[in-house]
Image (cartoon, grey):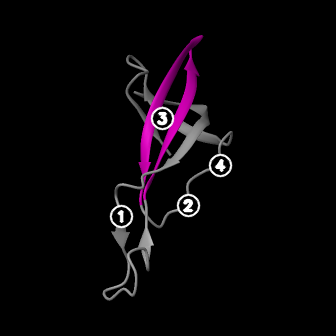
Amino acid sequence: MKKETTGTVLSVSKQWWLKVNTKPIRKGPLDGATFPYVIKVSYTVDGREYTKRKWIHAGDEPPAKGASVRVLYEEGNPAEAEIK
């Protein structure tokens, strides 16, 4: 059964090594390039703190550091979580 809690974004980092080109023809190496992000989220279940990482697709806006996010977790195994 899934339960819900609130997590806090600990870090937001841009993945510079994974470039996604958005233009078919470019004038320079970074013309039209976007990069995905990885966020690290901390959440607490029954007094125990867990951390989880999530990829944010290139072109999508990541949440700010310190922002609150929804976390869905399995009741029997809180380490198995999904960040919304």
Q: Mark 3 points at which residue?
A: 72
Say what secondary structure mark 2 lies in. loop
Residues marked 1 and 3 touching at CB (< 8 Å): no
Location of residue 36 in the rendering, given as x and y in whole percent from the top left corner: 43, 57
In the rendered structure, which disc, 4 or 1, sits on the residue that comes first in sequence? 1
Q: Residue 64 carries which label?
A: 4
> Mark 1, mark 3: which one is toward the viewer?
1
For the residues labelled 4 and 1, the Cα–Cα distance comes to 21 Å
For the residues labelled 4 and 2, the Cα–Cα distance comes to 9 Å
Which residue sits furthest left? Answer: 24
The answer to whether residue 66 is above or below residue 37 is: above
For the residues labelled 1 and 2, the Cα–Cα distance comes to 16 Å
> Mark 1, mark 2: which one is toward the viewer?
1
Q: Mark 1 points at which residue?
A: 19
What stretch of residues is rendered in magenta?
A: 36-57
- Give the residue type at disc 4: Ala
In the rendered structure, which disc, 4 or 3, sits on the residue that comes first in sequence? 4
Q: Mark 2 points at which residue?
A: 61
